[in-house]
Image (cartoon, grey):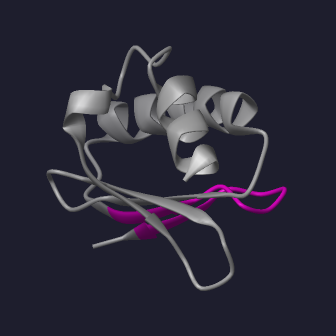
Amino acid sequence: MDRALESLKALSSSSLLAVKDIALVNTGISGDIILTTKGGLKIRLGKEDFEKKISLLERVLEDIYIKHKRIELIDLRFGDVIVKEK
């Protein structure tokens, strides 16, 4: 639960995605934090470095918005960002 709150606190600094846009905060089987937006986008944050990952998420979202892509999943658990389109 502490990591879930920590992830939301990190998200509060985002200018592209607000805490109010999050419908669900879940802990996966592996303990990873998974955010689901009200629009159905799943964002896998992993277990740590939430502030760094939210900063990276903002850059990814900016690129997605510019290119008008429809995205189902953004995975930030690994060194490379994984984006799954709809």
User: Along the horizontal axis of the image, is 70 left or right of 58?
Assistant: left
In this rendered view, identify the residue nearer to me: 45 or 78: 45
Q: Position of residue 45 (x, y in %)?
A: 61, 54
Residue 39 to residue 9: above or below: below
Where 64 sits versus 13, above or below? below
Residue 6 located left or right of residue 21: right
Q: In which quadrant will I find the C terminus? A: bottom left
Q: How many marks?
A: 0
* Residue 58 part of the magenta-drawn span: no
The part of the image, by quadrant, that contains residue 52 is top right
Work out whether residue 79 or residue 8 is closer to the camera in this orientation and state it.
8
Q: Nearer the viewer, residue 54 or 12?
A: 12
Q: Residue 60, percent across and down?
A: 53, 39
Residue at x 34%, y 29% (from the top left corner)? 17
Q: Furthest-front residue in view? A: 1
In front: 54, or 86? 54
76 left or right of 42? right
Name the residue furthest bottom: 29
The residues colored magenta run: 72-84
| Residue 15 horizontal side relative to residue 60, left or right | left
Q: Position of residue 85 (x, y in %)?
A: 36, 69
Quarter of the figure with residue 41: bottom left
Residue name at image x 31 percent, y 34 percent: 65
Q: Residue at x 77, y 48 (%)?
A: 48
Q: Hey, which residue is sitting farthest left in the picture?
A: 39
Residue drawn 61% across the image and 45% down it: 2
User: Residue 43: x, y in percent?
Assistant: 46, 57
